[in-house]
Amino acid sequence: MDEQGPATDTAGSATGGGPTVRARGITKVFPRGKVVALEDVSFVIKSGQFTSVVGPSGCGKSTLLRLVAGLIPRSYGELDVHGSDVTGPRTDIAMMFQRPILLPWKTALENVVLPRKIRGRLDERDWREGRSLLRLLALEEFRHAYPQHLSGGMQQRVALARLLITGADLLLMDEPFASLDEFTRERLNLELLRIQSEVAATVMFVTHNITEAVFLADQVLVMTPRPGRLAGIVEVPFGRPRTIELLRSPEFNDLAFKVRGLLGESI
Amino acid sequence: MKTREDPDVAAVEAQRLTELETSSLARRVGSAWPAFLVFALLVAAWEGAARAELISRLVLPAPSRIFLALIELFTSGLIWEHLRATFLETMAGFAVGAGSAFVLAVLSSFWGWFRQIVSPYMIILQVTPRVALAPIFITWFGFGLMPKIVMAATICFFPVFINTLTGLLNTDEEALEMFRSMGASKRQIFTQFTMPSAMPVTFAGLKTGITLALIGAIVAEFVATSQGLGLLIDRFNFRLAMEEAFAVLLVLALLGLLLYGVMEFLDRRIVFWTREERLSKREIRSRRGREDTA
């Protein structure tokens, strides 16, 4: 494919393993109104890598994530996760949304174990794991609270625990913290990085915030709208664990500006 | 939504729960006294007006006389047979009407084609003044319980159907997407998500439905019957025994209140999450127990 961006260097990741996601020329045309949401997008995400997808609204980043999740079918192109074609939702892929989508009639813990309940009867181990995930997210004492009694940040942390309990090693996150205030979001981003390294998951994280995209990721997919295209892939060479101090460094700012440059006229 | 991320948020939350639990009863009693006062004044004024013969006994008998008639109705045992009949008609009618409405609403939510076939009949049923069907039902089913049950069922059907259907169709698209991403089957999505989501609206329909079922039963009794509270009112009215007629009316009001109260209680039990004060410590404890045994 000739569509790989100027900054592409697929061999350069710090945390690389084998490929988890391999997309070649994927295109999505919505039949109603024949809208081209995505055109010829190609990229590789290695195992254990954190990939941000950044772009303005309408660039197809959410569509891209739903394609990888197997929630909508693609029109053209190849898409493999763990070497096998994505044809529908799979147990090795899990997704988190912008809103927490917690069930108000279930407690925090009951919400967390929901994916296990979908797969079969809940047993002692499921409850235990749910509880220890809530502990990991500092919510253990709220396990019997109903979501509507939790703050927005806490609700999204419950949703994160529910994402993790699936045991999927490809985690798709669609602007998960976008509706939270700045402070809560920063804190949850750091928490996410800590957890990602702990569970060694591969993450694909959609955002419209350039700083957030660069801070979190090993590589940033930069997308532009109408039609949704991949403008380039920016490798982020900074080591881990990362701290907020990184935001102050000139190298960080150079990368953020590089991403901004790729977005060009589209913002 | 407020952000409460502080470490001492647990303490705050616990305190808030205690406040909710202790204050709600006191607040309810405290805020109810003006209503009681107004009620007492109204009854007293009515009693006074009746005793001073400002109003004819045939128009509005004194509350004290109605009360005596009420006691007489129960001590003589006259009321029981009729109360039992009306109660049975209402409950059976509600069970049939609400039950079939629920099933049809679920089927209509599953299949668009089914909804298209069914909805014109629903609209016709809704715009027809259904009480006009009472004489026809009597002709069809005779003088026993049957025509009353059918009338009660017919009249309480619509609110349950339309509310349940609205609740089932009005689902959060993103939540459906989330369930699909978890690999949930259609049945799981229905039982785990769509059905519980529809419960608040369904219960609103059930509460309207149960009071309508009582109306249906009484209307059918007015047309022709051998027993029932409707018959009793009709008979006392005919004899100009207004105290007794009002006493039966009071019994009917209490029956309606009881039926509605039961539905309201079930609503609060089952659809606990729509009200803030549902989260009591007791509730959390009972759920904790359930989870530990699971």
Image: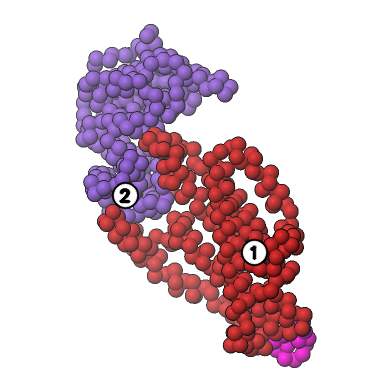
At a point 59% along the width and 85% down the height, the residue shown is B77
Q: Which residue is mark 1?
A: B146
Total marks in image:
2
The chain drawn in purple is: A
Percent position of residue B233, x then y: 70, 77
B283 left or right of A36 in image: left
Q: Nearer the viewer, mark 2 or mark 1?
A: 1
B145 on left or right of B280: right
Which quadrant does the N terminus of chain A fall into? Answer: top left
Q: Position of residue B180 (x, y in %)?
A: 41, 35
User: In the picture provided, is B268 more to the left or to the right than B67?
Assistant: left
For label 1, the SS is helix
User: Would you say residue A171 is visible in this rendering?
Assistant: no
Check disc 1 and give the amino acid type: Met
- Rendering colour (chain B): red
B165 in relation to A212, above or below:
below
Q: Residue at x 67, y 88 (%)?
A: B65
Specify the subunit that label 1 lies on: B
Q: Which residues are magenta?
A: B46-63
Q: Quadrant of residue A218?
A: top left
**SS assignment for the magenta stretch, majority:** loop
Secondary structure at numbered mark 2: helix
Q: Nearer the viewer, residue B223 or A202?
A: B223
One can see residue B260 in this view: yes
Instruction: Report x, y in % for residue A44.
Output: 31, 18
Say which residue label 2 marks. Answer: A109
Disc 2/disc 1 C-alpha distance (Å): 49 Å
| Label 1: how many Cα within 10 Å (few below 14, some 14–19, many 20+) | some
User: To which quarter of the image does residue B148 belong?
Assistant: bottom right
| Structural crowding at the residue carrying mark 2, measured as other residues with C-alpha within 10 Å and reported as few (<14), some (14–19) or many (≥20) | many
- In magenta segment, residue A220: no
